[in-house]
Image: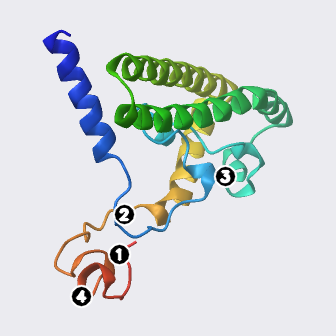
Amino acid sequence: MSRRIVSALALVVLAACASSGGDEPQRDTPPPSYRRGAPGSGAGMEMLLPPSRWWHDPQIAEPVNLTNDQIVALDKLGADEDDIEKLERDTMLAVRDFRRTVGESPSADILAAGRRTRELRDTLFDKQVAFLAAQREVLSVEQWKRLQDAIEAQRAPFRRNDGMRGGARGGWGGGRGGRGGGGRRPF
């Protein structure tokens, strides 16, 4: 096996091990519709794509001020969104299978599982970009800006931007005793 393939395999195994769950407590998370993208997809699209069927959420749709024609056009895109959600699930399964393969199988199987994962991620990314472009085409520039503002307003409570993790207040717990010490969570 070439040195380049061995190095790539080592990086993939290291990344898979580093991304596995640890002993950290569960954090408050945004609603599922705000957690777009398969974990580990690497695409970064979850922050670009609006929430699932956002045009039916009054808190987001009202500030955008959609016309009936725009709502109909966005509803027609629903099938594309269903495909994306299926690909997200398939990608999560492929990543899980890849991790299992790394621990149990010879290098040929690892490489095949890696290719399958990459192909699903690439397909997912392409579909997400096309879906984003199709939604963007329906909206005016001003509506798109209002949409982004409305989404940001809903996501803001779930952001952790206070820099308190592991800081002077003793980690997740926010008080004495570190992670298990109770107290207010910093998010």
Residue with the most extreme left position: 3
Label 1 with label 4: CB-CB less than 8 Å: no
Q: How is the image coloured?
A: rainbow
Mark 2 and mark 4 lie on one chain; the one further toward the N terminus is: 2
Quarter of the image where the C terminus is located: bottom left
SS of the residue under disc 4: loop
Q: Quadrant of residue 44?
A: top left
Q: Which residue is label 3 attached to?
A: 60
Quick one: quadrant of the N terminus?
top left
> Disc 2 to disc 3, how far (Cα)?
21 Å
Q: Earlier in the sequence, mark 1 or mark 3?
A: 3
Q: Nearer the viewer, mark 4 or mark 3?
A: 4
- Check disc 3: other Cα within 10 Å, few if <14, some if 14-19, many if 20+: many
Count neighbours of disc 4 (C-alpha within 10 A) and say few if under 14, some if 14 to 19, many if 20 or more.
some
- Residue corresponding to mark 1: 186
Q: Which residue is mark 2?
A: 160
Amino acid type, residue under disc 3 in the picture: Ile
Residue at position x 54%, y 23% in the image: 129
Q: Mark 1: give few (<14), some (14-19) or many (20+) Cα within 10 Å.
A: some
Residue displayed at 37% across by 16% down: 108
How many residues crowd mark 2 within 10 Å: few (<14), some (14–19), many (20+)? few
